Image: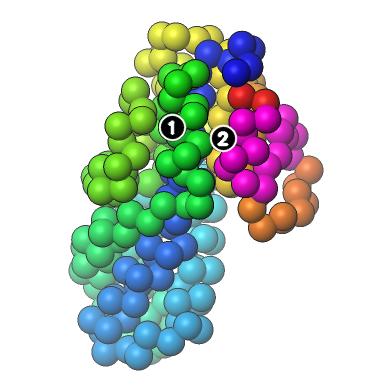
Amino acid sequence: MNRQYKALLMDVDGTLLDFDRAEAAAFTKVLQKYGFVPEERFIQEYHKINQECWEAFEIGQMERDRVLTVRFERFFGGHGLSMSGEEAEDAYRVWLGEGAYLMEGAVEILDYLKEHYPLYVVTNGVGATQRKRLKASGLDKYFRDIFISEEAGSQKPQKEFFEYCFAHIKEAGPEEMMVIGDSLTSDIQGGVNAGIDTCWFNPQGKENRKRISVTREIRRLSELKAFL
């Protein structure tokens, strides 16, 4: 246990839950709904569009509600299909909520951390979907509270999102917290903006091209035990 920290903030998608797997499963069903054969190239194309939209959201260039619909409009529009982004989003949202796939080592590390720290979720995902997935996976029981961007009125990496979290966490001040997540631009940059320590979960060994300041970097969740 590291007595420097008195609370840990943890990202969900790509850190505790396998979002890529859940996304692929849900989008496969969306493809079928619109008469497409669910080929891997379509899933990868959508994944890239989705990432671009969420990155635009993170830096304030796109509203969250637009992200949820425009990603489908861009994909299907690129394949000559005019359709309702709202209709596709509604169907996708139901299927995504069923995708509660655990990242390797998630339960084991949460079992360990919960014995030593108050744990909190910090996520930019859609509230109802994230709560459903956390409950379905059994992870909800580990956390004292769940902070979601649409409920906070701001999003990672904005400083305001973390200030919202700080205001609701009584066990620790910002200098006694660490944020743990897989996204450099959302989790880690957010921690930097908020002035708290960070741990970058980087299982694929990606290069930190933007040279964002990182307090700790790990490849496996189990490595957290070495310093927490």
- Which element is circle 2 on? strand
Residue 138 drawn at (x, y percent) = 30, 42
The segment highlighted magenta reads 212-226
- How packed is label 1: few (under 14 Cα within 10 Å), some, or many (20 or more)? few
Q: Do the residues labelled 1 and 2 touch (CB within 8 Å)?
A: no
> In what quadrant of the picture does the N terminus appear?
top right
Quarter where residue 70 is shown:
bottom left
Q: What residue type is labelled 1?
A: Asp
Q: Relative to 32, does residue 168 appear above or below in the rendering? A: above
Front residue of 151 and 108: 108
Placement of 63 over or under 116, stated as above or below: below
In screen coordinates, is 46 left or right of 72?
Answer: right
**Residue for badge 2:** 180
Res 127 visible? no
The foreground one among 53 and 16 is 16
Mark 2 closeness class: few <14, some 14–19, many ≥20 residues within 10 Å: many
Q: Is residue 225 magenta?
A: yes
User: What percent of the width, then of the height, locates residue 99?
Assistant: 32, 59
Q: Quadrant of the C terminus?
A: top right
Q: Residue at x 21, y 61 (%)?
A: 94
